[in-house]
Image (spheres, rainbow, N blue to C red):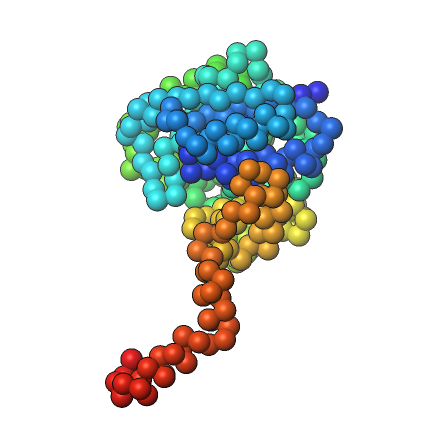
Amino acid sequence: MKISVVCTIDDKYAQHCAVMLASLFKNNPEQAFAVYIITDKSPSHHLNKLKKFLEQNINEFKFIPIDENSFQNAPISHHISIAAYFRLLIAEILPQNLTRVLYIDSDIIFRNKIDTLWKTDISNFSHAAAIAIGMDNYPEQIGLPEDSLYFNSGLMLINLDYWRKYKIFERGCELIRQTPEKLQWWDQDVLNILLCHTWLPIDLQWNSQVFMDGQEVQISSDYKDRYERFNYLTAKLDPIIVHFIGGGSAKPWHYGCTHPFKYEYEKYLQFTPWKGTVSIGKPSLISQIRYRLGLGSKLRNLFQILTNKPV
């Protein structure tokens, strides 16, 4: 059994994609994978490093460059690039003989085997996914029925035949063109609007988004039964797949990240060409020594005494 995996990235996420894939390979050592990397057309040193990493770890992979102009009107933000919308293209550009694929965001880490997830029956569904934690009241804001579940699109087991049949790319582009102001959560909103009530909810341990900025995501007591049904406690304490949701220091490659599973990212980083990379925002050794010894304040006080001037 070969598991087909697809990732959509730009140059900035090549390192994190490698770490995610390293965690996937290390936790599934006997499993064969076919990996597809959808990215932009720009040549990149980092993408070349990712390619070498894949050459050393698996036999089957392919980089698929696409034209960013297809999404020129799509809304983006400081940590969401146009590459996020590449998800809409998945069914169109992957080999037509593929009927299912596991889509994975690059801010994810695997902690165990995924064969059970891969074998999930999605023949009567558009895809399988986990609900987006803490967004239970959000569907109404984008025009979905009150009883709708809203899924996190960071990890999806996709029924490619379904996406092709119902023209997800074509309809998604049209939705972006018509109502870009409506899309607060970008292509995740697009997919939730197009695929409302067609997807299969799975346990949260397969996409644990419990923590953001080191704090547990707030959940309304009104939805206690829902979260118990999707095994929230297991997702919190012993997830199979950790998803580092949020931007900035919520990501494990930031020095200030306080996520309880941050060490998992650091562990698998050592199996990639980016081994030894310093976390973003980490102070230099000299700065750390000065801080611990209090040298900064001592030097300022000495300067003030010698010059008789306030600092």
Q: Single out the residue that lies furthest toward the right.
A: 30
Q: Single out the residue that lies furthest toward the top.
A: 97
Residue drawn at (57%, 11%) of the image = 97
Residue 226: x and y in percent read 59, 45
Q: Is residue 266 above or below residue 307?
A: above
Residue drawn at (70%, 20%) of the image = 1
Residue 39 left/right relative to 229: left
The residue nearer to you, when weighing 301 against 281, is 301
Is residue 270 something that shows in the picture?
A: yes
The residue nearer to you, when weighing 238 against 167, is 238
Residue 127: x and y in percent read 55, 27
Is residue 126 something that shows in the picture?
A: no
Residue 47 left/right relative to 228: left
Residue 251: x and y in percent read 49, 49
Residue 116: x and y in percent read 70, 31
Residue drawn at (70%, 27%) of the image = 31
Q: Which quadrant of the figure has residue 87?
A: top left
Quadrant where the C terminus is found in the figure: bottom left
